[in-house]
Image (cartoon, rainbow, N blue to C red):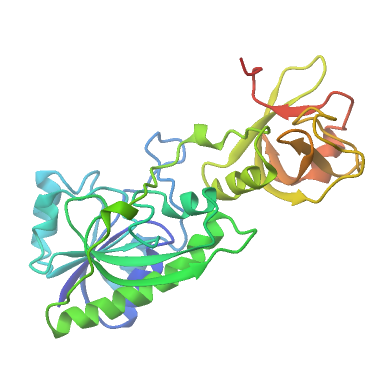
Amino acid sequence: MRIAMMGTGTFAEPTFEALLAAKETVVGLVTQPDRDAGNKRASTRQTGIGMAAIAEAAGVPVLQPESINTPEGVEALTALAPDLLVVAAYGQILKPAVLAVPKLGAINVHASLLPKYRGAAPVAHAILHGEAETGVTVIRMSPGLDAGEMLAKQSLAILHDETAGELEARLAPIGARLAVEVIQKLKAGPVAGEKQDPALVTKAPKLTKDMGLIDWSKPAEKVSRLVRAMQPWPTAYTFVHRPGKEPERVLINRVRKLGPVEGLTANSTAVGTVIELDPDRLVVPVYDGSSVIEILELQPAGKKRMTAAEFLHGHPAEDGMRFGAELPLS
């Protein structure tokens, strides 16, 4: 069976490596073009070894079209004469003309328990919505977004403090194993899939930078989930306000929820206002002032990522120091 791999980033890499390790006939790799960090179209996927680097080391031809859906892209894919496409986090929706190239169609390794979280950011949305578990589903691709028949599925518990990047790293090897298992079944003959229940469909749209803005009036659990879901991209953010100074934008990389704080009750302290429990800790009331978030790691604009203690050495806490939106909410 001639296989063309399509994927970008660290979620796709284990699947590609598993195909090569299994001695499958991989006739080509289709991956996103290399992006400059300043390019508006830069990929937001985590990068590891690099899909192109893996392909080059294995002697696999590499295609990096701006769009695989153009006539030129379809022509280049057709020239590989694949029997099957194996897709994992490729980053483009495949049009019918692309799906029609391989005679056995295409399978997609998707990082959710479909039909939940169809779309570009399933791992982040699972964390954001407080799911206890997620997983990987391998589907037979169809023109609908992540709507194909399910060929294999495995669940995985979400750890209470892990980020989207950390969870994706645990899901990727599961997807690789399931993909190889499905391919072995396809070699033996037609494989019956399970249809997705339309009533259970939820969406996981692409993340945007604006989604990372922290609303300190939300409960501590929701603030914590937002910070975890936005890692490694686009990263949660807020603004630090100091009396008499302009607001300063800071990225919030890691936080934790604290238990009850003595003397802190609903409406006793304005949300987002730093309270001084310790000179080296950033503790912030949220929701109605009765629950608390501790900021563990953050990154001021133009600076390196640092601990709360390192931040406070250069930005000592003072009365009235608070975190919030750049401008007061109307």
- Residue 211 in view in this figure: yes
* Between 197 and 252, the one nearer to me in the picture: 197
Vertical position of residue 30 compared to residue 206: above or below = below
**Residue 234 vs residue 300: left or right?**
left
The count of marks equals 0
Seen at 16% across and 82% down, the residue is 187
Q: In percent of the image, x 34 and y 66: which residue is there?
A: 137
Query: Residue 115 versus residue 209: which sits nearer the camera?
Result: 115
The reply to whether residue 301 is in sight is no
Coordinates of residue 196 in the picture (x, y in percent): 26, 60
39 relative to 229, above or below: above
Horizontally, residue 278 falls left or right of residue 142, namely right
Front residue (pair 194, 328):
194
User: Which image quadrant for residue 270?
Assistant: top right
x, y percentage for residue 269? 83, 30
Tell me residue 49's x, y (percent).
45, 63
Q: Residue furthest bottom?
A: 188
Residue 111: % across, % down: 40, 61
Q: Nearer the viewer, residue 321 or 48?
A: 321
Name the residue at 26% across, 65% down.
139
